[in-house]
Amino acid sequence: MNSVSDKQEISIEKLRAGERAELAQLVDKFSNPVYRIAMNILKSEQDAEDVIQETFIKVFHSIKAFEGRSSLTTWIYRIAVNEALMMIRKRKGIQVSIDEDAEDDEGVAAPHEIEDWCCLPEKEFMNAEFREQMDGAIGSLPQKLRIVFQLRDMEDLSIRETAEVLGLSESAVKTRLLRARLILREKLTHYFHERQPG
């Protein structure tokens, strides 16, 4: 997983003091995950790069007000998600929301057909063809599910941290994550079925 850990110490005090080396370390540490989050939402390299720029501008301007109620990681990811969603609203003139809705309280229906992946060799999960299939399946998820899946399963945030980033309840995050995983499993069933030993 490509996760970011707050254990790679970045000093909030130094950031607040505007120390250039600390600011540069922050950018170096968070640029890639912010880019991945933005690409996940926007599907455009140029837009994702714009989100990186806007995210760090906001971080630098707001760092003195950062109270540490959440981790630095979740705070930055929340800014990035908000920037990406704002860009969609501005450029396409459509309303985009990741807020909770009635679906988050409903039971999750099982997909029609799910292949058992337990017996596949590990190399099946590592090859380029599988990664391409997986990327396509993730990209086809509804946006609300895709964002939760990325933050939890790809960026390695906890359920609580994912809920903080998206402003959702933990139960909504769990429901969306389960839906996303089931949909992905179903989408990849055919791919794995062809590779099961006969």
Image (cartoon, grey):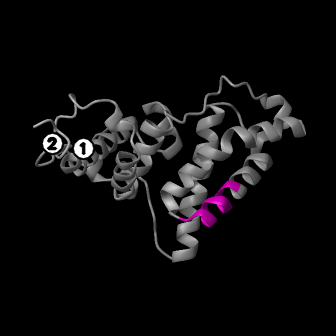
Q: Which residue is mark 2?
A: 114
The reply to whether the magenta stretch includes residue 10 is no
Q: Are marks 2 and 1 in contact (CB under 8 Å)?
A: yes
Instruction: Report x, y in % for residue 138.
Output: 37, 52
Residue occupying image coordinates x 60% and y 51%: 35
Q: In the picture provided, is 19 more to the left or to the right than 72?
A: right
Instruction: Report x, y in % for residue 141.
Output: 34, 55
What residue range appears in magenta? 44-52
Q: In the picture provided, is 132 more to the left or to the right than 44?
A: left
Q: In the picture provided, is 29 more to the left or to the right than 109?
A: right
Q: What amino acid does circle 1 point to?
A: Arg
Residue occupying image coordinates x 20% and y 28%: 119
The first of marks 2 and 1 along the sequence is 2
Residue occupying image coordinates x 25% and y 48%: 188
Q: Secondary structure at mark 1?
A: helix
Instruction: Report x, y in % for residue 150.
Output: 45, 44
Magenta part mainly helix, strand or loop?
helix
Q: What amino acid does circle 2 point to?
A: Ile
Is residue 84 something one can see in this rendering? yes
